[in-house]
Amino acid sequence: MISVFQPVQYPMDPRWKIPTREECRYYWNLYHLPGHIREHSILVAHVAEYICTLASSRGLPVNTAAVVASALLHDLGKFFCIEHGGSHNQLGASLVMELTGNPAIAQGVMHHVCWPGELDIHKFFLPLVIIYSDKRVMHERIVSLETRFEDIYKRYGVNPKMYRLIHQSWLQTLEIQEQLNRTLEADLNACTFDSRRVVQGKGGFSGRR
């Protein structure tokens, strides 16, 4: 049995289903995802697709459709967990695995909060790009990492344990960004990802309070 809970590399198997954008919207309807979570997921997919385009132009073997599907479905379990409790990434990964049978896509959902394994953008492109893309979208806005983590610290850093976990996530996301910048020859934190959207909240934040 394939487990998406383990940080292992999944070369994309042509037998695994990759849902289309329309199918992802159908899954949203199945699990009654509210509009603001859909908007957030659309923007995360937009950032992820942009990164895939850069990666493809640099010759990386990227499956853009799988990355976009994982981004669109990364919060599939969130509304249920808001209502009833539980881990939205674990529930979402289980739902995605059941719906698609694709462990690579489900792994991106499972680990979009943080990555428990080796930080290697070449080996683990899909899950690490999902983590990074999610950290660039605050609610329904594309923002800088600094702004996103300021919000996360304020909302969830309610005790020393949570603060340490968030700080670990901050450092991990910075490392992912640095690897992406080197690999893609880009400055992603200065990137708007869309000429109609301006990155908000640059500068100042160091991840320490």
Image (tube, rainbow, N blue to C red):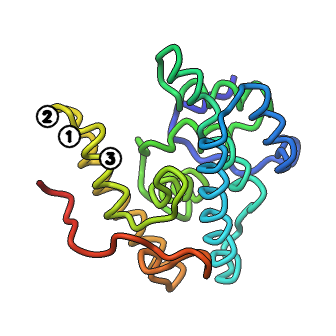
Contact flag, marks 1 and 3 (Cβ < 8 Å): no
Q: Secondary structure at mark 1?
A: helix
Mark 1 is surrounded, within 10 Å at the Cα level, by few (under 14), some (14 to 19) or many (20 or more) other residues, namely some
**Residue pushed farthest top?**
84
Does residue 156 appear to the left or right of 81 in the view shown? left
Q: Is residue 89 above or below residue 209?
A: above
Look at mark 2 in the image and give the residue it sits on. 160
Q: Inspect the image, locate mark 3, and give the three-letter code of the amino acid beneath it.
A: Ile
Look at mark 3 in the image and give the residue it sits on. 152
Mark 3 is surrounded, within 10 Å at the Cα level, by few (under 14), some (14 to 19) or many (20 or more) other residues, namely some
The image quarter containing residue 145 is bottom left
Residue 20 is situated, as x and y percent measured from the top left of the image, at 85, 49
Contact flag, marks 2 and 1 (Cβ < 8 Å): yes
Q: CA distance from mark 1 to mark 3?
A: 9 Å
Does residue 17 appear to the left or right of 188 in the view shown? right
105 and 1: which is toward the camera: 105
